[in-house]
Amino acid sequence: MTAAAGAPLRWNDVAEKGGVLGIRVLVGLTTLLGRRAGRAVLWLVAAWFVLLHAGVRRTSRAYLARVGMPTTLASVYRHVRLFAHVSLDRIFMARGDFRHFAVSSHGEEHLRDAARSGQGAIVMLAHLGSFEVMRGLADVRGLPIHVLAYSGNARRIAAALRAMNPSIEARVIEIRPGDPSFVFEAEDVVRRGEILGTMGDRVGLGGKSAVAPFLGAPARFPAGPYLVAAALGCPVLVAFGLHTPPNRYDLYCEPLADRIVLPRGAAREEALAAWASRYAARVEHHCRLAPYNWFNFYDFWSADR
């Protein structure tokens, strides 16, 4: 954590704890002994993380209160532990190994229709459950998805996943602060008639945002996906991979818009806020379905994000 004491905790302050999590050790352990051994280690890792990081406890409790869940230390621990287990499962999913999981797909036909249409599509994801289950399952079923991602605060995890499956690298468009060329790479994916996945719940560094109601209070969401979709005239989907311990994942995919049209002038900001509100409502719906799956451990509702 790099935020100053008393300052709002922002998403880019929440760096990976590579040495503590022992990413390489964990990968080796799961390779040799399997998923069960890795999960056993993460029970202890989650406890360490909760006890030593007041910012994580504070932000977890703030979210749990908004979604109507208990805010006890045990609830915070359950929240963090689920995040740890979903992170571990990314190792297997990056390999295309789904033998350990019971995956139910709801609305997969929307992804297939988007792939067949030839006009491309944007899929808006969230730090809710696992986006890796969507990407991995899509690969297995012949629907490769390119993902727009920022790994500046999780480089070790990203490197470990690339080492296990180098083909991931070809389907990741790295967000590079200060270098806007990644936007053109993302647009090219859609223009080729392919699918672009992007996170819709974190405002990029210096990125344009829109305010939308979320779990009872206004919060900022990125406006970029709607601007790109409007420019390219492509449909927009939303997708969430919700985890139910120990082995179940439910992948939900649904259309958000067949096409986004943005007016000019002052009405443009209102239209962006309306689309952000529509997305936020779907995120909120799925948060209530699986409340411990929300993995934004920072001051999400802070005005200074």
Image (cartoon, grey):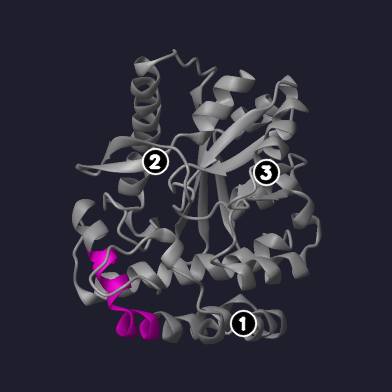
Upstream in the sequence, badge 1 or badge 3?
Answer: 1
Would you call the spot at circle 3 few (<14 residues within 10 Å), some (14-19), or many (20 or more)?
A: some
Question: Residue 251 lies in magenta, yes or no?
Answer: no
Task: Identify residue type, mark 3.
Answer: Phe
Q: CA separation, marks 1 and 3?
A: 32 Å
User: What range of the chain is rendered magenta?
Assistant: 47-61
Residue 26 bears which disc, if any?
Answer: 1
Task: Identify residue type, mark 1.
Answer: Leu
Q: Position of residue 184 (x, y in %)?
A: 70, 35
Residue 234 in sight in this render: no
Dot 3: element:
helix
Residue of label 2: 221
Upstream in the sequence, badge 2 or badge 3?
Answer: 3
Q: Position of residue 149 (x, y in %)?
A: 60, 51
- Relative to residue 281, is residue 89 depicted above or below? below
Between 88 and 271, the residue placed more toward the observer is: 271
Residue of label 3: 182
The answer to which image quadrant residue 232 occupies is top right
Q: Residue at x 45, y 38 (%)?
A: 208
Q: Position of residue 288 (x, y in %)?
A: 30, 47
The answer to which image quadrant residue 62 occupies is bottom left
Between label 1 and label 3, give the one nearer the viewer. Answer: 3
Dot 2: element:
strand
Dot 1: element:
helix
- Tell me if 287 is positioned left or right of 45 in this view: left
Q: Residue at x 69, y 72 (%)?
A: 160
